[in-house]
Amino acid sequence: MFGDITVNNLGLDEKALDTDGITGIFHLAAAYDLAVARDKGMQINVEGTRNVVDFASRCNNLTRFDYVSTAYVSGTHKGVFSEKDFNLGQQFKNFYEETKYLAEKIVRETKRLPWTIYQPGIVVGDSSTGETAKYDGPYYALLTMNAFPDGFPFPRIGSGRAEVNLVPIDFAVNAMAALHGDPAATGKTFHLTDPSPMKVAEIQLLFARSIGKHFLSYPLPPGLAKAAMKFKPVRSIYRMPYQLIDYLVHEVHYESSETATFLMNHKISCPKFTEYLPNLIKFFKAKSEEELQGILI
């Protein structure tokens, strides 16, 4: 049965649906796009979540409502952002962050809804196979580096000290599945993030080495980089939305000790990026340029 979160009752035939038989709901649907327009983000992320929450509230035997948010509801907050943090007076770097924050706020404020909230970092391919269905986030840098010749100048935006919080898809899925079945997880927020993330400069160097290249690094101020990326010819070269630049210079650390404690009981932990990077690269290299462009978001 298919529905539509942007319409009342999710576009479902309530007479044909046994809501009393529904005991668990996972809400993952969202406009996942750093460049999303505010009206679209409000329609899908905010009103869509409100519709799902309204539907869930009519499921009398619901024991868990699992909502997938994002660690980046932290917005412009700098420093440590813990699992217990939410409204710290932060602003937002783009409408994606803002609308995901507003959507999560709806979930948190809904009375009698047995919610659990997951705030993942940047999700990449499977740690064992490298497989992924989307090439965004750090893959933009890989796509550009792959196209550039060895020894070509490559920009270093900002200090390079900002953390890049990457997590493999299998870790995120396994963690959500385990926590869904853990009654003690109800009413809690979990950071599905890397407890020891690498920094921008470190990842840039690792990526280059992993594809057998070395680039001449040169400093580029973030403001100038964002201005340049607004031009289509520049975007066609660097293959990334200009909104991504904010994440290369924003210094925030996602504290995840409570999540680690919960997941330890289920023998789940986030693998180190250096351990599964070879698998990501192997899968990446197996794709042709045409295939990469076809699944690039």
Image (cartoon, grey):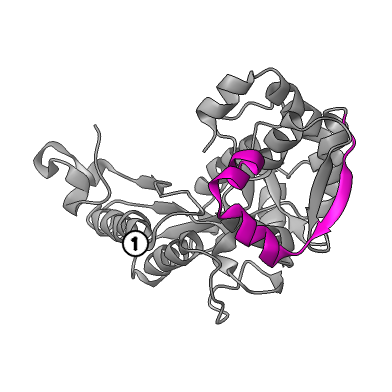
**98 left or right, relative to 253:** left
**Res 21 quadrant in image:** top left
Q: Is residue 166 visible from the viewing direction of this image?
A: yes
Q: Is residue 254 visible from the viewing direction of this image?
A: no
Q: Camera-side residue: 120 or 160?
A: 160
Q: Camera-side residue: 91 or 20?
A: 91
**Res 258 quadrant in image:** bottom right
Q: Position of residue 151 (x, y in %)?
A: 89, 35
The amino acid sitting under disc 1 is: Met
Q: Secondary structure at mark 1?
A: helix
Q: Is residue 267 above or below residue 96?
A: above
Instruction: Check disc 1 and report the residue beneath it.
Output: 42
Which residue is pictured at 63% across the width and 35% down the height? 170
Q: Is residue 251 above or below residue 6?
A: below
Q: Which residues are magenta?
A: 213-239
Q: Position of residue 87 (x, y in %)?
A: 53, 77
Does the stretch in magenta take in 24?
no
Which residue is pictured at 89% across the width and 44% down the height? 216
Q: Position of residue 213 (x, y in %)?
A: 87, 31
**105 left or right, relative to 85:** left
Q: Position of residue 177 (x, y in %)?
A: 54, 41
Does the stretch in magenta take in 218?
yes
**227 left or right, relative to 250:** left
The crowding category of the residue bearing disc 1, from other C-alpha atoms within 10 Å (few below 14, some 14 to 19, many at least 20), is many
Which residue is pictured at 42% across the width and 69% down the height? 105
